Image (cartoon, helix red, strand yellow):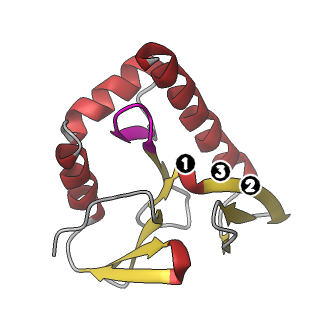
Amino acid sequence: MNYIINGNTLWIERKENKIYINEMGFNKVIYNGNVREIINKSCLYYGSSYHGRIQGSSLILEANYKLPIIIKDNAELIVFPLVTSTLKDPIWFIYNNIKEYHQIKKNKVLVEFTNGQTEAFNVSFYTFNQQILKSSRLYVVSKTRNG
């Protein structure tokens, strides 16, 4: 199965040796490959490689750690990894589909997506917010450069 990240993708996570792709409408696609493979194929589908997108993000953000990347040109699809000490594998969020987020407990964030769907994630608000800020910066710079 080949999955391409698209405007309906909300987040991608690995659980119990399977990849769960969560989409608008509460659809879940189960994938047996790995997340990096999905991201790389999606980058290639939209015209670049994962490695090229990482280099672009690193240059724009002047950073090298936990970088968000533009999957689709003109910043129409930006993904960012969320890595914590309790997560073995990162959860990849589609920045463009996040409407709001709030801290609900010390290490729990409630995310509301653009379709109204909500989901709680076991992560600190600070960590989540930092990734949103990086993604926002990438979005703004990309939009400014591309008109």
Q: Which amino acid does label 3 sit on?
A: Phe
- Helix, strand or loop for disc 1: helix
Quadrant hosting residue 74 = top left
- The image position of residue 15, as x and y in percent, is 40, 80
Residue highlighted by disc 3: 128
Between residues 129 and 98, which one lies in front from this camera angle?
A: 98
- Helix, strand or loop for disc 3: helix
Circle 3 crowding by C-alpha within 10 Å: few under 14, some 14–19, many from 20: many
- Whether the magenta-drawn stretch holds residue 70 is answered as yes
Mark sitting earlier along the chain (2/3): 2
Q: Which amino acid does label 2 sit on?
A: Glu
- The image position of residue 66, as x and y in percent, is 46, 41
The residue positioned 46% from the left and 74% from the top of the image is: 22
Tell me the CA gap for discs 1 and 2: 11 Å
Q: Which amino acid does label 1 sit on?
A: Asn
Residue highlighted by disc 2: 100
- Numbered label tally: 3
* Cβ atoms at labels 1 and 2 below 8 Å apart: no
- Whether the magenta-drawn stretch holds residue 63 is answered as no
Whether residue 25 appears in this view of the structure is yes
Q: What stretch is highlighted in magenta?
A: 68-77
Residue highlighted by disc 1: 96
Between residues 30 and 127, which one lies in front from this camera angle?
A: 30
* Cβ atoms at labels 2 and 3 below 8 Å apart: no
Whether residue 61 appears in this view of the structure is no
The residue positioned 64% from the left and 60% from the top of the image is: 114
Left or right: where 136 falls relative to 75: right
